[in-house]
C-alpha cells in the first residue's frame, strides 16, 4: 500500500486530507513542522509528500523542499498553499516541487493529483534513486562519489550539491537565483558572486582534456549541464 507524508500544521486539515487519501487506499503519516518533515522524509521512504508552504518551527515549506532535494530525497512533492499567484506557483515548482495546489482545494482533486504522482515511473529511467547518470557523469548519492568518463573526481560538499542540482536539470538553463535558492537554501542576493565562484571551481574539477566542458555558461541567464 502506498504511503504519503502529510506536512500540515493545521490538525483539522491534516485529518481531512488523511481521510480522503484513506478512502482511495493510501496510508498516511503526519508531520506538523518543517523540521519534523525533513527528519521523517529522510528516515522513511514515502511514495509522495503533501507539503504545506506556511509552516511553524523555523522551516517553511520551500526550505523543507530545498533541504530534501539537497540531500537526495527525490520523493514526489505536492505543494499546498494559499499563495496562488503565478510567481508563487513557479517558485514552488522551480524549488523542486512536482505539483502545486492552491487553497482552498477540492479533496477529489487532491487525491487525483497524489494518485498521479505516486504512479509516476521512477526517475532516471528506472535506475535506483541513489544513483544519477547524465552523459558521462555519474554520482552515487549514498557514497557521495562522482565519476566522469570513469575517472573519480573529489568534490567538496557544496560542489557535490551543486553538481547534483545541475544533473537533476540536464540541458536546462538555471539562473543564479534558482541555483542559489535550491543549493544554498537562501534568497539570492544579486551582489554576490558566490555562484560564479563555485561553478568555476566545479567546472575545473569536471573538465577532462579531450572532452567538452560539462557545464555551459548561458549568456544572460546562468548555467546548464551539457547532456
Image (cartoon, rainbow, N blue to C red):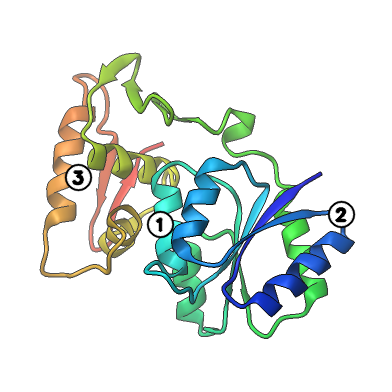
Q: Is residue 96 visible?
A: no
Quadrant including the N terminus: top right
Image-quadrant location for residue 121:
top right
| Mark 1 to mark 2 CA distance (whole Å) | 29 Å
| In contact (CB < 8 Å): disc 1 and disc 2 | no
| Element type at mark 3 | helix
| Mark 2 to mark 3 CA distance (whole Å) | 45 Å
Residue 152 placement (x, y as % from top left): 28, 17
Q: Nearer the viewer, residue 146 or 141?
A: 141
Q: Does residue 135 appear to the left or right of 163 in the view shown?
A: right
Question: Mark 3 sits on what residue?
Answer: 199
| Mark 3 to mark 1 CA distance (whole Å) | 19 Å
Compared to residue 42, the image places residue 27 above or below, namely below
Residue at the image point whose x is 32% and y is 42% from the top:
161
Q: Is residue 76 visible?
A: yes
Q: Does residue 89 appear to the left or right of 225 in the view shown?
A: right
Q: Residues within 10 Å of mark 2 (few under 14, many from 20)?
A: few
Tag nearer the camera, 3 or 1: 1
Q: Nearer the viewer, residue 105 or 220?
A: 105
Question: Mark 1 sits on what residue?
Answer: 66
Residue 109 placement (x, y as % from top left): 78, 72
Residue 185 placement (x, y as % from top left): 31, 60
Which of the marked residues, 1 or 2, is nearer the chain's N terminus? Answer: 2
Quadrant including the C terminus: top left
Residue at the image point whose x is 34% and y is 56% from the top:
174
Question: Mark 2 sits on what residue?
Answer: 25
Residue 25 placement (x, y as % from top left): 87, 54
Which of the marked residues, 3 or 1, is nearer the chain's N terminus? Answer: 1
Amino acid at each position: 500500500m502506498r504511503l504519503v507524508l502529510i506536512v500540515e500544521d493545521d490538525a483539522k486539515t491534516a485529518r481531512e486530507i488523511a481521510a480522503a487519501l484513506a478512502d482511495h487506499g493510501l496510508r498516511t503519516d503526519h508531520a506538523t513542522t518543517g523540521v519534523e518533515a525533513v527528519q521523517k522524509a529522510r528516515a522513511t521512504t514515502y511514495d509522495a509528500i503533501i507539503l504545506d508552504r506556511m509552516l511553524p518551527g523555523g522551516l517553511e515549506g520551500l526550505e523543507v523542499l530545498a533541504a530534501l532535494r539537497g540531500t537526495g530525497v527525490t520523493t514526489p512533492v505536492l505543494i499546498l498553499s494559499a499563495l496562488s499567484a503565478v510567481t508563487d506557483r513557479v517558485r514552488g515548482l522551480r524549488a523542486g516541487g512536482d505539483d502545486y495546489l492552491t487553497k482552498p482545494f477540492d479533496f477529489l482533486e487532491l487525491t487525483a493529483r497524489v494518485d498521479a504522482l505516486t504512479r509516476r515511473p521512477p526517475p532516471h529511467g528506472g535506475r535506483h534513486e541513489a544513483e544519477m547518470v547524465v552523459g558521462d557523469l555519474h554520482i552515487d548519492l549514498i557514497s557521495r562519489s562522482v565519476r566522469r568518463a570513469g575517472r573519480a573526481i573529489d568534490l567538496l560538499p557544496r560542489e557535490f550539491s551543486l553538481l547534483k542540482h545541475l544533473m537533476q536539470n540536464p540541458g536546462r538553463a538555471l539562473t543564479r537565483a534558482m541555483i542559489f535558492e535550491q543549493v544554498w537554501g537562501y534568497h539570492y542576493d544579486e551582489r554576490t558572486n558566490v555562484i560564479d565562484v563555485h561553478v568555476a571551481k566545479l567546472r575545473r574539477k569536471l573538465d577532462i582534456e579531450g572532452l567538452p566542458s560539462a557545464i555551459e555558461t548561458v549568456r544572460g541567464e546562468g548555467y546548464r549541464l551539457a547532456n
